[in-house]
Image (cartoon, rainbow, N blue to C red):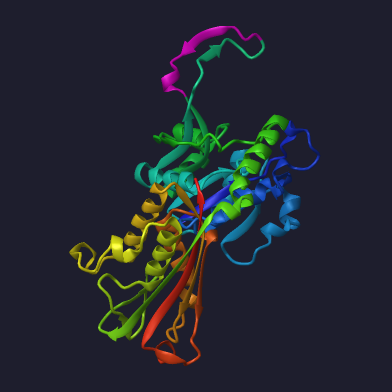
Amino acid sequence: MQVSAIIAAGGRGVRLGRPEPKQLLAVAGRPILERSVSAFLGHPEIGEVVVALPRELVDAPPPYLQAPGARLRLVAGGARRQDSVANAFARIDEAAEIIVVHDAARPFASAALISRTIAAAAEWGAAVAALPARDTVKCVTSVEAPFVRETLPREAIYLAQTPQAFRRAVLAEALAVAAEATDEAMLAEQAGHRVRIVDGERSNIKITTPEDLAAAEALARAAQEPAAAARTGRAGIGYDLHRLVEGRPLVLGGVAIPFEKGLLGHSDADVVCHAIADALLGAAGAGDIGRHFPDSDPRWKGASSLALLEQVARIVGGCGLAVGSVDATIVAERPTLAPHVAAMRANVARAIGMGVDRISIKGKTNEGVGELGRGEAIAVHAIAFLTPV
């Protein structure tokens, strides 16, 4: 399933009272727009990101929007939000089946929130992240004379956020609706589609007023505390080696790589996943893969090591730890691994449940030395860094 994302960043943010567009303002040292765009560029399910900007920013974008490659594209926004989204939609890859729309002014959307919104849209056609109302809700007679007309049942009220995600045909029909709307979910409703609610996040705030900006600064600073306290984190080292034999598929990082030999092992012998799993377990002080997934257990006969890695991530979470980053080096004389590294990183990120920007996988040869240099085996060294939740 191919997924594309639209970042709506065409507005000026006049309510913030700043001369520059609010999306260019920094929160804890990082521009709001850069935070929002990187959340989607780094997500393993997102294939491309199209950003709708004010015209002058399209002509002279900030450095973090100048990354080369087809995964990031810039378009000029329109007079209204829906015009900006429509302009971006026109540039989306025709192969995209699901399109996610997100406000640039919401810089803290998590990878998990993005994933569950995509999944709900794939199942139901349209989905919106939202939070249940906490307070009693009053409907008033008018804005000018705000007398209570009725009290609405709080349990039926949700406060909409972004991301919002849609099957391609649903979003196309929504954008064709000739009506004013505050978000794409509202247009989808008017086009006759049901929109599924998925759980939003309290931290997924929208920066609109100076008070919001102050709250975002505090939130970002608090999120940086684990990194600032990295000396209290935990590191683990993993290593694995498997012999290459004929008649076996070669699977590395969950990617089946065309080659005349494959790795010998009880499962699919994916040395990348095994080394990373051992690094994670080592950092958590939770043993090793031999203890949790012994080769005497028939459940793991021929099993995908990505499934093993998913279980390891759950073990780590159960220890009260979160994965900060993973770095792995594959030592193999052949085949050439560079064309497959991006897919490996995406697979590992998805299995662990983290952004692909925190997964590093590299390929090295052994310069013809030893069994690795003779092409008799492939080995992987890995390190993982964990922080307390």
Furthest-right residue in view? 19
Say whether residue 293 is visible: yes
Count of marks, rendered view: 0
Q: In the drawing, does residue 370 fall left or right of residue 264?
A: right
Q: Is residue 241 or residue 22 the one in the foreground? A: 241
Residue at point 32%, 60% (across, down)? 307
Q: In the drawing, does residue 201 fall left or right of residue 66?
A: left
Q: Position of residue 353 (x, y in %)?
A: 44, 53
Q: Quadrant of residue 301?
A: bottom left
Say whether residue 89 is visible: no
Residue at point 46%, 50% (across, down)? 321
Q: Which residues are magenta?
A: 145-157
Furthest-left residue in view? 298
Q: Position of residue 329 (x, y in %)?
A: 49, 74
Q: Is residue 147 magenta?
A: yes
Q: Position of residue 361 (x, y in %)?
A: 50, 70
Which quarter of the image is occupied by the N terminus? bottom left
Q: Is residue 35 magenta?
A: no
Q: In the drawing, does residue 92 fall left or right of residue 118?
A: right
Residue at point 49%, 9% (across, down)? 150
Residue at point 48%, 49% (across, down)? 99
Q: Is residue 44 or residue 139 the one in the foreground? A: 44
Q: Is residue 125 above or below residue 311?
A: above
Q: Quadrant of residue 14?
A: top right
Q: Is residue 232 or residue 181 the one in the foreground? A: 232
Q: Position of residue 82 (x, y in %)?
A: 59, 40
Q: Is residue 240 above or below residue 102?
A: below
Q: In the drawing, does residue 368 fall left or right of residue 312?
A: right
Q: Is residue 86 above or below residue 291?
A: above
